[in-house]
């Protein structure tokens, strides 16, 4: 019971709601059951409608993964592995998050996921010696 409470609290603390017209949600798509190898993003565009983006830490894992779920519920869908601290753009078209996209250097300041295509683009830190997360 304590584990469920911790998961629910973590979900609520890190959840970010996207309001982007329509009634569909991630629950209507086939969920991603397995974590992609090599730290990759999900394929394809994200569904329209309200989505909640959140990070999830699996016990024993070293890093958090980034998921989305429809506001109406459903199965969470893996967006990127790793990924944390998600924030939607004001218009809901882009999800910004932290992730090391170029290990072992990890000079990525921010990763941007384009909702219409599912593509992830990393942007380097202005000064590699300055941690800007």
Image (tube, helix red, strand yellow):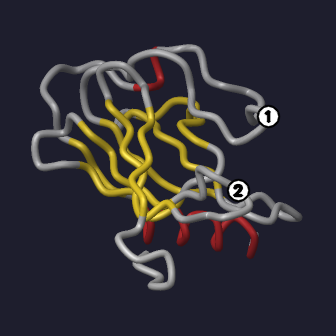
Q: Quadrant of residue 46?
A: top left
Labels 1 and 2: the sequence-earlier one = 1
Between residues 130 and 28, which one lies in front from this camera angle? 130
Q: How many marks do you count on the picture?
A: 2
Closest to the observer, 128 or 85: 128
**Residue at (22% x, 20% y) in the render:** 23
Residue 75 pos. (x, y %): 58, 31
- In the picture, which quadrant includes the C terminus? bottom left
Residue labelled with disc 1:
37
Q: Is residue 67 above or below residue 41?
A: below
Which residue lies at the image location 53% right of the left edge and 43% below the top edge?
A: 67
Residue at 65 percent across and 73 percent down: it is 6
At a point 49% along the width and 60% down the height, the residue shown is 108
* Front in this rendered view, residue 31 or 96: 96
Picture layout, residue 117 above or below residue 76: above
Q: Is residue 49 left or right of residue 53?
A: left
Answer left or right for 28 relative to 55.
left
The N terminus sits in image quarter: bottom right
Other residues around mark 2 within 10 Å, as few (<14) / some (14–19) / many (≥20): few
Instruction: Give the spatial CA distance, label 1 vs label 2.
Output: 14 Å
Q: Quadrant of residue 86?
A: bottom left
Residue at disc 2, secondary structure = loop
Pointers 1 and 2 in contact (CB under 8 A)? no
- Residues 5 and 61: in front is 61
* Residue located beneath label 2 in the image: 103
Secondary structure beneath dot 1 equals loop
Quadrant in which residue 103 is drawn:
bottom right
């Amino acid at each position: 019971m304590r584990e469920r409470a911790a998961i629910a609290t973590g979900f609520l603390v890190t959840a970010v709601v996207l309001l982007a017209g329509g009634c569909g949600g991630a629950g209507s798509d086939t969920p991603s059951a397995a974590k992609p190898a090599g730290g990759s993003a999900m394929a394809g565009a994200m569904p329209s409608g309200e989505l909640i983006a959140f990070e999830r830490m699996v016990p024993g894992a070293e890093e958090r993964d980034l998921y989305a779920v429809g506001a109406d519920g459903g199965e969470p869908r893996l967006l990127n592995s790793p990924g944390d601290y998600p924030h939607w753009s004001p218009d809901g078209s882009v999800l910004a998050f932290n992730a090391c996209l170029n290990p072992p250097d990890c000079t990525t300041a921010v990763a941007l996921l384009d909702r219409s295509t599912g593509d992830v683009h990393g942007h380097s830190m202005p000064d590699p010696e300055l941690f800007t997360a």
